[in-house]
Amino acid sequence: MSSKVIYQNYVHGKYLANGTGETFEVINPATGNVSYLVEVATESVQQAAIESAKTGFAIWSAMMPIERSRILLKAVALLREQNDDLAAGEVLDTGKPWQEASVVDIVTGADSIEFFAGLAPSIEGNQQPVGADFYYTRREPLGICAGIGAWNYPLQIACWKAAPALACGNVMIFKPSEETPRGAMRLAEIFTQAGVPDGVFNVVQGDGRVGAWLTTNEDIAKVSFTGEVGTGKKVMAAAAGSLKEVTMELGGKSPLIIFNDADVENAVSAAMLANFYTQGEVCTNGTRVFVQQDIYPRFIQRLKERTEQNIVCGDPMHPDTNFGALISRDHQQKVLDYIEIGKKEGATLLTGGTALTPDNAPNGFFVAPTVFIDCTDEMTISKEEIFGPVMSVFTFTDEDEVIERANSTHLGLAAGVFTQDITRAHRVIHQMQAGICWINAYGASPAEMPVGGYKMSGIGRENGSETLKAYTQIKAVYVGMQSLESPF
Ligand code: NAP
């Protein structure tokens, strides 16, 4: 019998036993050890989650938006109060550095809930005269929404999905990744503590099979999914069976374009942020770094120096660590395999390229920050999302050429441009086939700014006021003001 803590599914404001005792293990990526166990959402839990969500919806959707807003703002305050404890949980689950999780993951999750709580009372319809009659519209919630999350920002993803859904009067059944189930449970506890009615945010645990159940259940009106393109296609196909609405936040292979007139240190900072933050496990990563020829030698020199001197890899909880462990042994191997493919296909390793065994975390799943130069657009590492700390650097000569090369991918999540030329900056960004773009910046994603992908990187947006439309449906009401004319 294991002495590890066993978590249950969170349904109707409390933890609920699954009846069978079937569990899965959660591994700490920095040690390789089992941290805790979680019960799988069996059929009885799934049924309970749906019934509870129906009850929760009846109460939550009938509340005044400003009441919902007040309750959500209490949850925001609790998230901020418990920041350090919540961030430590994220570090233990994901392997990302405490340096990041303590100032980004919970903060940006809370910001999103605060943003949508603020918007909730402003959701309104319109009215228009039609002769002597008129019609008006109401923006009504969709009902039960499912959220399915990836493992790289577990609590933040749960917040980003719950925030607009709940603000609009919907309820959510959330399934976190099996690799990082803790953050969503903590969020559910906080919602309950804040006064969110039971059933408004339920958490079901398990692997893709539990996710697949959410995508086919006929009581669920919408699925908001974050994950790989391949899984996204399956989710969307399954959701089509009951014509659910979908939001798809998928993968990327984003370009970062650095022109000759860019500030070299800023450009190197951007390339490192866009490839080594959260040890490279960020969907918007600028993994294809295009550098114009004149600036290339200096850029490469500084990139190598700063990568080799400034990255501190090790125990993610250590305050000095700025580069953590990859999510799993399998994922570490997948990233190392891509590095081998890069070498075989003729790219040159500028730095990195190996697994790491830091003294204070020798059994963790680390891969060195890796930079390939002499890359060509046809190489596998230039085309496929690696989702690890592997940067590919390319050179280019002119603007039209780099725009074409940057866009020649079926993905379109993000793009960045570094230049001092204001007209070129906007001209180039306007031609990028990508949903999230940065000029002389990379990675910042405030709650006010919509995020989502072009092409196969996604459908719909998260954050930003646009997202309210994705969690409401319009009801049009025609009002007759006179005697009805009828031929009958
Ligand atoms: P994934 O393998 O696609 O899994 C995502 C979620 O889907 C997990 O909870 C997974 O469960 C679940 N799932 C698996 N099969 C399913 C099915 N048939 N039906 C329903 N759900 C299913 O992605 P990941 O490896 O966790 O995350 C990495 C990917 O996420 C990368 O491609 C990254 O770019 C992308 N991402 C995108 C964004 C964005 O905003 N665009 C943000 C973060 C990450 P289990 O894992 O428990 O099996």
Image (cartoon, helix red, strand yellow):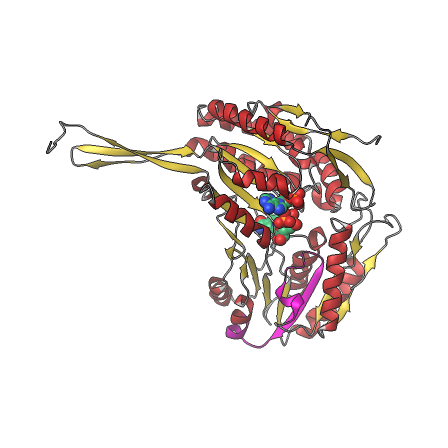
Residue 230 appearing in the image: yes
Percent coordinates x, y for residue 87 in the rendering: 71, 38
Residue 77 appearing in the image: no
In this orientation, which residue lies closer to the viewer: 374 or 246?
246
**456 relative position to 329: left or right:** left
**59 relative position to 37: left or right:** left
Which residue is farthest left?
487
Percent coordinates x, y for residue 446 in the rendering: 56, 45
> In the picture, which quadrant includes the C terminus?
top left
Q: How many marks?
A: 0
Percent coordinates x, y for residue 469 in the rendering: 43, 41
Which residue corresponds to the image point at 60% horizontal and 52% vertical from the top-left? 228
In this orientation, which residue lies closer to the viewer: 76 or 365?
365
Q: Which residues are magenta?
A: 379-402
> In the picture, which quadrant includes the N terminus?
top right
**412 relative position to 20: left or right:** left
In this orientation, which residue lies closer to the viewer: 424 or 125?
125
In this orientation, which residue lies closer to the viewer: 214 or 61?
214
Residue 292 versus residue 279 in the image, above or below: below
Q: Quadrant of residue 104?
A: top right
Which residue is farthest right?
359
Residue 256 versus residue 182 in the image, above or below: below
Percent coordinates x, y for residue 324 in the rendering: 77, 50
Residue 217 versus residue 94 in the image, above or below: above
Residue 399 falls within the magenta-colored stretch? yes
Residue 207 versus residue 410 in the image, above or below: above
Which residue corresponds to the image point at 60% horizontal and 61% vertical from the top-left? 253
Residue 478 falls within the magenta-colored stretch? no
